[in-house]
Amino acid sequence: MTSSIDAVTRDWDGLTIPTAGTYVLDGAHKRVGFVARHMMVSKVRGEFNEATATITVAEDPLQSSVVATIQAVSVDTTQADRDAHLRGPEFLDAEKFPTLEFRSTGVKSRRGSEFVLTGELTIRDVTRPVELEVEFEGVGRSPFGQDIFGFSASTEIDREEFGLTWNVALETGGVLVSRKIKIEIEGEAVRQA
């Protein structure tokens, strides 16, 4: 006997994955975060509270695609002064550039449930290629009858390549904020009817 979840999953290269279709990022089950080094000695973590994404799962999973939009004003490090600085013209300039955008350009299978998602990231109208290390976390059905799958992804960018060049030199050497920023994403995607 075939269960109803079997009708929306398939086997591919040893993985159970969703059948082809369009999925959207579940706003209640996502984290779009980042990590920067502060004063060369510690890490500051933050996230963007408002982000949307549409994931098109193709018949050939390696032809799948992602389009994502992040609201710059939603940056949150739990420190109001720092968040205001990040939203301002020395960093994201959220008033002039209200969104950060990502559009995938390809998917490569690495091993098992690990993939590389290539794409273009746009911050402050500067677009650069990025590679996200993606782990497919599984597929299932929520208690509300929604078909979902989970994933995590990470990459590292050089913020100065996107025009985010503000910094302060430290007397002891180094700078106040690292150039390298780690991006960390966790999410669930929900099939659209």
Image (cartoon, rainbow, N blue to C red):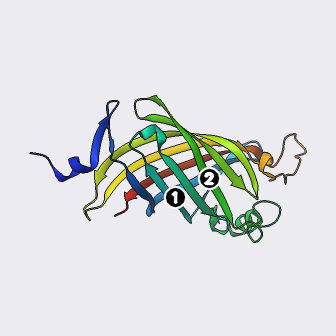
Residue name at image x 89 percent, y 47 percent: 169
- Left or right of 146? Residue 186 is right
* Residue 90 numbered tag: none
Q: Residues within 10 Å of mark 2 (few under 14, many from 20)?
A: many
Amino acid carrying label 1: it is: Ala
Q: Look at the picture and state if 174 lies above or below 191.
A: above
Residue name at image x 46 percent, y 37 percent: 62
Estimate the x, y position of residue 47 in percent, counting from the top left. 60, 58
Of callouts 2 and 1, which one flags the residue occurring earlier in the amino acid sequence? Answer: 1
Amino acid carrying label 2: it is: Phe
Of all residues, the one furthest to the front in this rendering is 59
* Residue 102 numbered tag: 2
> What residue is pinned by disc 1?
53
Estimate the x, y position of residue 178 in percent, counting from the top left. 76, 45
Q: Look at the picture and state if 182 lies above or below 90.
A: above
Q: Residues within 10 Å of mark 1 (few under 14, many from 20)?
A: some
Residue name at image x 28 percent, y 41 percent: 10
- The C terminus appears in which quarter of the rendering? bottom left
Q: 167 or 105, which lies in front?
A: 105
Residue 122 occupies which quadrant of the picture? bottom right
- Left or right of 76? Residue 113 is left
Estimate the x, y position of residue 111 in percent, counting from the top left. 44, 27
Of all residues, the one furthest to the top in this rendering is 111
- The N terminus appears in which quarter of the rendering? top left
Secondary structure state at the residue bearing disc 2: strand
